[in-house]
Image (spheres, rainbow, N blue to C red):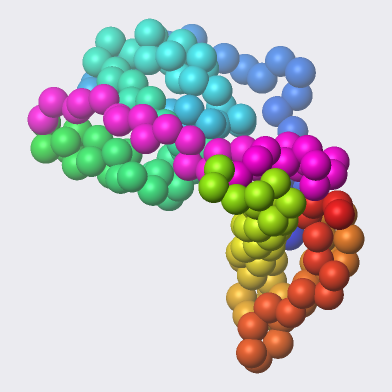
Amino acid sequence: MFRFSLAPFCASWPEAGPNPPVEANPLPNVPTLLLSGNDDLRTPQEDAAKLAAQLPKATLVRVPSTGHSVVGSDIFGCATRALRHFFRGEAIGLCKDHGELLPPSPVPPSSLSRLPRVSGLKTGPGRTLLAARLTLADLFEHAVDALLSSPDGITIQPVGGLRAGFFDANLKGLVLHGYSWVPA
């Protein structure tokens, strides 16, 4: 994903030096809206809160599930609503936290026997079906990632399975070549 990031532009950014000059004048006493993404690694919310404390008429809006580019990456539209209310002179509410957008993947089992039993099915067939479902879920995750990472948005390069094999794509769909998430 590095090739799609803006990081290469930072290489030519001018160096501020160890002690950049600090403006001695007080900050203006004007209405100010600060949008801060909860997942911003570049400018953490602590910095936004410090700045808001220095601005007499500041409103700080913390936007959940959003990183550095708040307006462009807020999929729930809270930042846009905050901007709209701010420019209309209306009250700005809190952003609703919708929880984890993509929960972490479960830890892969080290063997088929480590999978839980499936109620209503015999142990062997139930675990085999569960392993197939988990393998297909993993495949789907990697296929979406491969598609989003592809240079043309269409071509998928071969992607290896966690335990064995790989998958690739052709005009008919995804083709699994011994792809495995759970070892037999």
Magenta span has 2? no
Q: Please give left or right for residue 67 compared with residue 35 in the image.
A: right
Q: Is residue 74 above or below residue 180?
A: above
> Which quadrant is home to the C terminus?
bottom right
Viewer-proximal residue among 56 and 93? 93
Q: Residues in magenta?
A: 90-118
Query: Residue at (28%, 20%) from the top-left corner?
Result: 59
Residue 134 in sight = no
Res 18 → quadrant = top right
Report the residue at 33% width, 45% height from top: 76
Number of numbered discs present?
0
Q: Position of residue 23 (x, y in %)?
A: 51, 15
Nearer-the-camera pick, 27 or 65: 65
Give me the residue at 38% from left, 8% from top: 53
In the image, residue 183 above or below residue 114: below
Which residue is at 26% across, 25% downward?
94
Q: Is residue 92 magenta?
A: yes
For the N terminus, the quadrant is bottom right
The x, y position of residue 96, in whole percent, is 30, 30
72 to the left or right of 14? left
Whether residue 7 sits left or right of residue 158 in the image: it is left
Whether residue 41 sits left or right of residue 18 in the image: it is left
Q: Residue furthest bottom?
A: 171
Image coordinates of residue 118 in percent, x first then y, are 60, 45
Give coordinates of residue 29: x percent, y percent: 26, 15
Magenta stretch prevailing secondary structure? loop
- Whether residue 116 is visible to the viewer of this picture, yes or no, is yes
**Front-most of 131 and 51?**
131
Quadrant in the rendering for residue 25: top left
